Amino acid sequence: MAVSLDIDLLRSFAHVAESGALSRAAERVGRSQAALSMQMKRLEDIVGQPLLTRTGRGVVLTVHGERLLVHARRILASHDDALAELSGGRLDGTLRFGCPDDYADAFLPALLRSFAQLHPAVVIEVVCAATPRLVSRYERGGLDLALVSIPLDAERAILRREALVWVGAKDGGTDRPDPLRLALGDPDTLDHRAALAALSQAGRNYRIAYASGSLSGLLAVVRSGQAIAVLTQAAVPGDLRILSRTAGLPALPKIGLVVRLEERHASPLTRAFAAHIRSLLPVL
Amino acid sequence: MAVSLDIDLLRSFAHVAESGALSRAAERVGRSQAALSMQMKRLEDIVGQPLLTRTGRGVVLTVHGERLLVHARRILASHDDALAELSGGRLDGTLRFGCPDDYADAFLPALLRSFAQLHPAVVIEVVCAATPRLVSRYERGGLDLALVSIPLDAERAILRREALVWVGAKDGGTDRPDPLRLALGDPDTLDHRAALAALSQAGRNYRIAYASGSLSGLLAVVRSGQAIAVLTQAAVPGDLRILSRTAGLPALPKIGLVVRLEERHASPLTRAFAAHIRSLLPVL
DNA sequence: ACCGAGGCTTCAGGATTTCTGATGGCTGTG
DNA sequence: CACAGCCATCAGAAATCCTGAAGCCTCGGT
């Protein structure tokens, strides 16, 4: 007797669960209905539990079936991710990928290099911008795929969590001017909003010393020691200092990263890159 | 040509990757070395990419192999979870399960009921206590399995994230006495510490009006309107009120939930229940 | 009440897949 | 240079899995 589940069996099972009938599931997976019947029996043998109860019209899941379905979906999702990333022989073509500029340094090199190793013929055009701009561009169809920041309390499955931190010049003194001088990026970004929210909640006075969409301009101001800023932890360059919370600055929330794409009409290449991000980002 | 990966193939592949040699992997999975060779070829056909480069001494993974290995481990972990939860025909015996008392109301009923449906012959002894006590009890061998809270910034894979919130009596006025009156639970818990940390960071004065390990005692004090408390969101009973942050109370962090067990020498029953928690908790 | 449609299971035969054991080639080591 | 360790390949055998036919059951319409 087999001791492992089988992807094909699980896929058939998922179809059965969705359609409520072996015969309809059989159509979808392109096999005879007898085959489906035998597959389900096999699955029940492997699991050692009944999964379906046969009614006159079709079948319904047992308790064990319901639980297995949860696992089956998870396994199938991982499996499809794996195949999307690796299969299809040589992929080629061009992909327009949007990446928040604060993550570009931290993630892009590893992401692009490892994907290029897998699929050397693919050209990836990277658009770096603040998340809100990426979103609008994506929605206008100007991107195939975008990595975006979202608040942590959102519903979606978060790929990775990043801390927001206060940063200042490395040699900056420990004294903080009372109207705190801030350098802030794009006004719609999470870090911008989180900074202001944290300060006003803590009742601190502040003054915006610099505001613009340009990350490098912002960093220049911070390096000059004229202001401090809020960045995602991964974006802090080595020559800046993370200001510990002992400095009297309010705590900042964490934010989440997700990948945006329409799973429905994405090309194999888009799927492959999405799967690559999903599997790599959590461990980078 | 097959269009799906196969769990057995992936398991063989994982063994090959770990041992660096087909022959050793063959021993471990109990097949001939020729079989392993053919399996790996099959896998390469399915994926459409070379996975191994044959050296004189053994094999090493290609770039594609490395990426597949990541996915393979994920898939195998899900698969083993599925089998652990469902298989083995009828499980029976007794399991000592530790659950933080603040989650007991929210999760235990669903968790125990659905597991009982799967394995009616199993008896689960539940120990409800604050996390630190569960941990010490677990470490003394007094529990087979425990659900525990940990800070969100920990390394481990978090099963679920819960918000900490301020709660007060439903009809409590909106005025807060300046030395805030707090009711706090076990002094080592995350909620206790988070409450004090948040208040002192915000510079609020407070006074501890009640402190004890008993959650129900604590709730009684809060109901009386004599004090406010910090609870995990899931633990707030319907007759208490969550104090919105507009009330001038400092923000509280979120915390994470993980399951504690020694994967090494856990019984099938323990594994089954752990797998059950892992698959159910995120969606409860 | 009866009949037909739709649905599931079972069975036997055959096609396909996958294993084993043997053989041979290759690569480093002593 | 011979040997040991390792992998690929091959042919036959074994196991698996599918198809198509036949049978049983339930439901709904006549």
Image: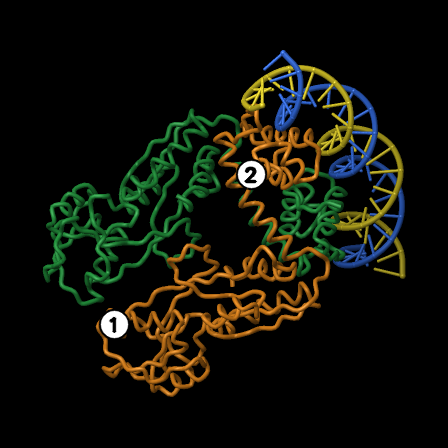
Chain colours: A green, B orange, C yellow, D blue
Q: Residues within 10 Å of mark 1 (few under 14, many from 20)?
A: few
Q: Chain of mark 1?
A: B
Query: Which label is found at residue B18?
Result: 2
Q: Are marks 2 and 1 on the same chain?
A: yes
Indicate whether A63 appears above or below A20: below
Query: Which label is found at residue B7?
Result: none
Residue D1 falls in which quadrant of the image?
top right
> What residue is disc 1 on?
B200
Does residue A134 appear to the left or right of B8 in the view shown? left
Q: Position of residue B153 (x, y in %)?
A: 37, 58
Indicate whether B11 appears above or below B98: above
Indicate whether D30 appears above or below B17: below
Q: Secondary structure at mark 2?
A: helix
Does residue A265 appear to the left or right of B165 in the view shown? right
Q: Nearer the viewer, residue B132 or B243?
A: B132
Instruction: Give how far apart the Cα atoms at labels 2 and 1 are.
Output: 50 Å
Indicate whether D6 appears above or below A144: above
Does residue A20 appear to the left or right of B281 in the view shown? right
Mark 2 and mark 1 lie on one chain; the one further toward the N terminus is 2
